[in-house]
Amino acid sequence: MAQAPQLDPILENILDQARWAPSGDNTQPWRFEAIEPRHVVVHGFDTRSHCVYDLDGHPSQLSLGALLESMALAASSHGLRMEARRRTAMPDTLPTFDVRFVDSPGLLPDPLAAFLPQRSVQRRRLSTRQLRASEKAALEGSLPSGYKVQWYEGGRARLACARLMFDNARLRLTMPEAHKVHRDVIEWGARFSADRIPEQALGVDPMTARLMRWVMQSWRRVDFFNTWLAGTVAPRLQMDLLPGLYCAAHFALLAEAAPRHIDDYVAAGRAMQRFWLTATQLGLQLQPELTPLIFARYVRERRAFSRTDGMQELAQELAGQCQDVLGAAAFERAVFLGRIGAGPAAQARSLRRPLQELLVVPADGKTPA
């Protein structure tokens, strides 16, 4: 097997920083092909073929947008401006980008670049302290033109959002299509994981984690516990309801128009990353809450996602609940949901694959000059 090439030191630093971009279940749907010292091809992929959450690859495309924004931020620390162009001839399942870095005299380093490795998901309870006006202004100001934030604050709004996540978790935990995903993406007994979610980052107590680990070994066990022993209640309480109540606010990032194409989702991912990094800069913690949007779109487009009786009907109810919580005006334009608040950084988190594992050999087999 050919070895990954040695990189130009500046390009290596940019990619090493950018690989900390967020991705669903820590899939890291990207590989890098260094063509020249200032030219790299980002080979993206998605998990739609085996992950029920990656509907049409759009969540993976959000992640690719976050990666590109991270590359631009890291490049600014070297006085370089990033130019990225998607190869439109590539299939939707393999979004591919030519990325070039151009000398830009006078370009100041973007302060958000310093927070790329620090940004992480916090799934545990946060402070209920309301966001300060200055914090909200910084978060809203972090978004590029065409995006805005809608806040869901106060006890009543947080309860509505928490119930939405609690009810959606019932859907996630009672269908076999999702069980296959959960079984594969958790690294049990771990505090950190290079390519999955470590158990200690799930936000459940050790007893619940041990039970989950045993039950999730087979769908028959999952189905039995769900049917006869209320098996979803403890994890839903700990991972969805209580964290949803214990935070400063929930929020939706809204685009001017409902996203339709790859480029829309990539652009939304770039906006999401700036918002998330700004939260990190402010000392705030954040957790994504994308599930309601994903299953609402399954319903809206009349697409089946499970062969289990009752799942489509449950999703229909949840889509209505999601629209009620977000508001009709925001429902179709929301590109990202999450909860946010003050609190300690996560003590357990997903890491990333080493950069050398993310590099691919150029098609001509040559090392970049």
Image: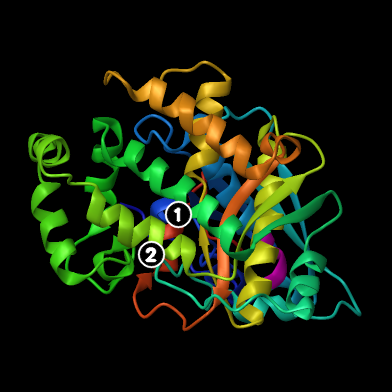
The x and y percentages for residue 335 are 65, 44
Mark 2 lies on a secondary structure that is loop
The residue nearer to you, when weighing 210 against 90, is 210
- Residue drawn at 36 percent across, 80 percent down: 347
Mark 1 lies on a secondary structure that is loop
Determine the image quadrant of residue 129.
Answer: bottom right
The residue nearer to you, when weighing 94 against 312, is 312
Magenta-drawn stretch, dominant element (helix, strand or loop): helix
Do callouts 1 and 2 mark residues in contact (Cβ within 8 Å)? Answer: yes
The x and y percentages for residue 292 are 51, 40
- Considering only vertical position in the picture, is 8 above or below 178? below
Three-letter code for the amino acid on which mark 2 is drawn: Arg
Residue with the most extreme right position: 106
Q: Name the residue under label 1.
A: 28
The x and y percentages for residue 256 are 82, 41
Q: How are the residues colored?
A: rainbow
- Residue drawn at 45 percent across, 49 percent down: 163
Determine the image quadrant of residue 354.
Answer: bottom left
The residue nearer to you, when weighing 200 against 368, is 200
Q: Sort mark 2 into few (<14), some (14-19) or many (20+) by Cα contacts within 10 Å.
A: some
The residue nearer to you, when weighing 321 against 309, is 321
Q: Sort mark 1 into few (<14), some (14-19) or many (20+) by Cα contacts within 10 Å.
A: many
Pick the quarter of the image with the C terminus. bottom right
Between discs 1 and 2, the one toward the N terminus:
1
Q: Name the residue under label 2.
A: 353
Determine the image quadrant of residue 58.
Answer: top right
Q: Give the range drawn in magenta.
A: 69-73
- Residue drawn at 18 percent across, 63 percent down: 209
Numbered label tally: 2
